[in-house]
Image (cartoon, rainbow, N blue to C red):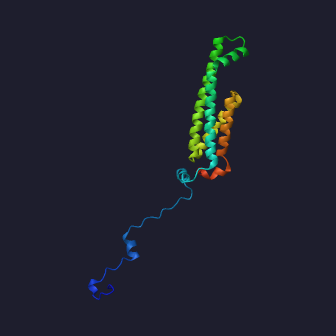
Amino acid sequence: MTKPGNSDPDDAAEPATTPEKAAAEKPAKPAARKPVMPTAREAAAETTGKPLPGPIRWGFYLVVTGAVVGVLGAVYLLANQDVLAEQQMRIMTDMTRTEAEQVVSNAVWTLVIINVIFGVFQALFAYKAREGQRRARLFLTIATVLILLFHYLLVQTLFGLIAALVAAIGVALYHLPVVRDFYPPRPRLK
């Protein structure tokens, strides 16, 4: 075939490569198939692009607020150990002042340590659940149930009761039906 305006066949343009020749020259790559059921890691990667639902954002704030209130309540009791020791002496009249102070000191420090540890766990798991990790949401729920049981059954302080209630409301927001699509599907057991 010659170029328009050129009648000499030697000056003709090279014929264009046909699609069949181009396909034969390139090695064929197997088509990437999307798995029927994505792995947990793949599903989590897909959720990172989704916008954060409002209930999860507010649940995170409530859980962290509950943890902070619990720690502040324990620190408040730590600062008021003398008042607690006097109340302990009124309840148990056969105790000396040093025994009452020692009992109160041990109890308050235990309360501080428990609140700090569970507060850190709650904040960490709330943050990870905010990223779309289903397992973190489960651990957050377990830690909050333990805090609820501790504050409502064992050590009933005003700050502890408020902290546990606020954290429980925050965790409940993580389990609303509105946020169900934010978390990847459960991995199937084989």
153 or 131: nearer the viewer:
131
For residue 40, side relative to residue 90 (left or right) = left
Q: Is residue 26 above or below residue 167?
A: below
In the rendered image, residue 69, in percent from the top left (x then y), is placed at 63, 32
From where the camera sits, is residue 168 visible? yes
Residue 106: where, in percent of width, then height?
61, 20
The image shows residue 65 at horizontal and vertical percentages of 62, 37
- Viewer-nearest residue: 162 or 137: 162
Q: Quadrant of residue 107?
A: top right
| Quarter of the image that includes the N terminus | bottom left
Total labels: the figure holds 0
Residue 66 lies, with reference to residue 100, above or below; the image says: below
Name the residue located 58 percent from the left edge and 31 percent from the top edge.
117
- Residue 101: percent from left, percent from top: 63, 15
The residue shown at (72%, 15%) is 90
Is residue 148 visible in the rendered image? The answer is no
Q: Is residue 16 above or below residue 139?
A: below
